[in-house]
Image (spheres, coloured by chain):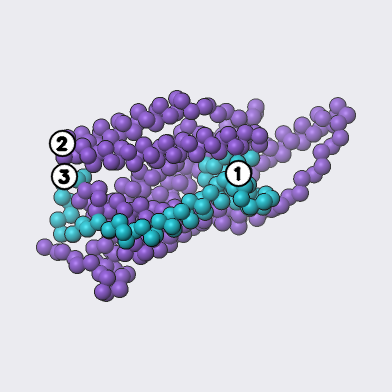
Amino acid sequence: MSDTTITPGIAIVPIPVRELLPWVIFGVLALLAIYFVGADEGATSIVPGMYVHEWVHDARHLLGFPCH
Amino acid sequence: MARTLLIRGMLVGLLAGLLVFTFAKTFGEPQVDRAITFETAMDEAKVKAEMAKGMPAPPDEPELVSRPVQASYGLATGVFVYSAAFGGLFALVFAFIYGRVGHLRPRAVSALLAAGGFVAVYLVPILKYPANPPSIGQPDTIVFRTEIFTIMIVISVAAMVGAAVLRQRLVPSRGAWSATLIAAACYAVVIIAAWLLLPPLDETPEGFPAAVLWKFRIASLGMQFIMWTTLGLVFGELADRILTSGYGLPRANRPRTVLH
């Protein structure tokens, strides 16, 4: 809670944005990875065929993505 | 610092993946198998009825990946990639919000981020569009279903971010308690509007066993709960050590700990 100081002994210093920016690319890669698990060869397709879809089939269902 | 946090996030994601996989294998896979048994019986009955009308039998579809592989290596691949990716995203978002959401120590920020992520990314979207086992869902509506599911997630995450920003702005004038309640109420209003406005979806076939559907959805919920809890607590502990004592960082990069 912003108006209560529950950690008096520790300096809470934000990480500067310019230090974070170069790592945003990994966020994009992570989203791409989630896309491959969740949606490729379903609604849209980057990799041709159905192999990715069939390989991650059970995970796709259980992680809550629409499938088939 | 950002690099260290990102790597830790992905490693914690892999640990979460291991727990999620074990849970999914135990509680999720039996339901997937039962759903596929139902699907196969439906398909066979359909083919039989068509053949009785004089239609030719459809050609057998080649099985690209066998069921045992789907239920083991396939499931593991999907779960580990998903968890590691979320671990990385979690670490990046954490690195941005830490120190910008009030005077909270790292493990508290991590726990709150995990709670918010679980609600915004999974819980709220699936209350509208629940996870479905095989045999539920028409193949020709997959594009539509993926679109509305994605829209629901985007709305939910955007509303959660908006609520968090709103809360920050209100804290100075209203105090933390009221600011939190107002922000939560705004999130709820946006979500209820989205639930009402987005199209309904009901493609459960006649006769699908209700118990299997319930257990499948609970297994799916359990997997997500385990993943987000692991990220929140384990990453939080590691981040706490890194940010307050420089644990795991080269000596020169360690933050000056202020211990009064």
Residue pointed to by mark 1: A44
Q: Residue under mark 2: which chain is it in?
A: B
Task: Nearest to the eye among marks 1 and 3: give it.
Answer: 1
Residue B26 x %, y %: 54, 50
Q: Is residue B216 above or below residue B52?
A: below
Residue B63 in percent (x, y) is at 73, 50
Of the residues shown, which amino acid type is indicated by label 2?
Ser
Quote the CA–CA distance across marks 1 and 3: 47 Å
Image-quadrant location for residue B146: top right
What percent of the width, then of the height, locates residue B12? 41, 59
Q: Report the amino acid beneath label 3.
A: Asp
Which of pointers 1 and 3 lies earlier in the amino acid sequence? 3
Say whether marks 2 and 3 touch (CB < 8 Å).
Answer: no
User: Is the Cβ of the residue at disc 1 closer than 8 Å to that at disc 2?
Assistant: no
What is the drawing colour of chain B? Answer: purple
Q: Circles 1 and 3: CB distance less than 8 Å? A: no
x 66%, y 41%: residue: B36
Is A8 placed left or right of B204 in the picture? left
Instruction: Kindly state the secondary structure of the residue where label 1 is placed.
Output: loop
Q: Are marks 1 and 2 on the same chain?
A: no
Question: What residue is disc 3 on?
Answer: A3
Chain A, which colour? cyan
The answer to whether residue B12 is seen in the rendering is no
Q: Residue at x 31, y 64 (%)?
A: B1
How many numbered discs, if any? 3
